[in-house]
Amino acid sequence: MSAWSRPVILLLCGMLLMTISIAVLNTLVPLWLIHDALPTWQVGAVSSSYYSGNLSGTLLAGWTIKRLGFNRSYYLASFVFALATAALGLEEGFWAWTLWRFAAGTACALIWVVVESALLCSGTVRNRGQLLAAYMIVYYLGTVAGQLLVSRVSTELLHVLPWVTAVVIAAILPLIFTRITAQGDEENAAPGRMWPMLRRRNARLGINGCIISGILLGSLYGLMPLYLSHQGMSDATVGYWMALLVSAGIVGQWPVGRLADRYGRLLVLRVQVFVVIIGAIAMLSNAAMAPALFVLGCAGFTLYPLAMSWACETVAHHELVAMNQALLLSYTVGSLVGPAMTSMLMQNYSDRVLFVMIAAVALIYLVMLMRNAGKHATPMAHA
């Protein structure tokens, strides 16, 4: 595949549909649990079970892709996701929903590894950045579309699940008409392994950035709807605010990427993390929620692709699948720890702890970036 070839376009179309479904469920599942009067810690636990599934899917992805290939792995994951979504309407209760969200998280992680690995392995040093940028833009566009749908359509459980399940099944159709392959100049080289990637010193700040990004975005996705609902907002209003948050991430993708190419990853990462801290502090003040959410989304949602590109530029072509697994694993660990830890603190103290945690975690990463300036090379985009 080359940049903007037919397989690439079809793959991104399937990903767009899949992301719409993921976004709708990530927003509505916490709200449905709140309406059932579940305590905050159980809402956070269900969100964490989804990210636990992401961890499981990441670990299984390499073996699955090797055995089944990109297409069949995508089909399998899509069917599991559709089944886990439909099952939410068949069974009620904390434990049943925890199980099915775990299954959905496993399927979603496998889909992400398939799509990201196919794009990265098929690209070259000149167009890989374009492919990754297109992927992130499509991902966030699908997320915004999902949030807007939440604000427009009925949010009743049995009204939402049928069409969301249908959209998941429809996301399979584009890949039926093409075969995804990933052949590069080093296709005969032995494939890399995931665990050694986590120990690479020159990729450590990128890996740490993915962990921090997972904590931030996992908390925002899983607990921001809870925070907004506790402020007395309706489901539709929550959808609008979540759409604003993710839209800011779309707006920031291209400028942040260009700035990173021009001024270096390290400087841009420092500025991004500092802006995340400012956005979190602004949310605590309740002075102007719209600008604060926009700033928080613009900086927070662009952190993962920049950290990911940092780490991927340090490996050879045949090691990209393994590095992608390692980065998604790092992100998933953060996504698992973030909502679980933050929800417990919110339960015991206040909903405003959400933004205290975001600021604190971002500050830790900023200290890493400042301390390791002379110990890590700053990779630049090859193009």
Image: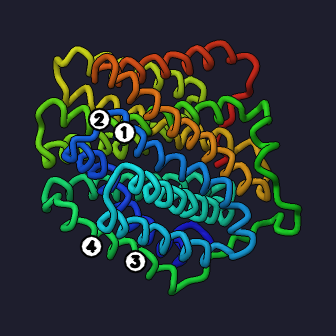
Q: Earlier in the sequence, mark 3 or mark 1?
A: 1
| Disc 3 to disc 2, C-alpha distance | 33 Å
Label 3: which secondary element = helix
- Which residue in the structure is indicated by mark 2? 39
Front disc: 1 or 4 = 1
| Disc 1 to disc 4, C-alpha distance | 25 Å
Front disc: 4 or 3 = 4
- Amino acid tagged 2: Pro
Q: Is residue 31 visible?
A: yes
Mark sitting on residue 255: none
Label 2: which secondary element = loop
Report the residue that reaches farthest toward the bottom. Answer: 177
- Which residue in the structure is indicated by mark 1? 42
Left-right relation of 256 to 208: left
Q: Are marks 2 and 1 in contact (CB under 8 Å)?
A: yes
| Disc 4 to disc 3, C-alpha distance | 11 Å
| Disc 2 to disc 4, C-alpha distance | 27 Å
The 10 Å Cα crowd at callout 1, few under 14, some 14 to 19, many 20 or more, is: many
Compared to 297, does 84 lie above or below? Answer: below
Q: Are marks 3 and 2 in contact (CB under 8 Å)?
A: no
- Amino acid tagged 3: Ile
- Which residue in the structure is indicated by mark 4? 162
Give whichever of 11, 337 is nearer the camera. 337
Front disc: 2 or 4 = 2
Classify the position of the N terminus by image quarter: bottom right
Compared to 69, does 103 lie above or below? Answer: above
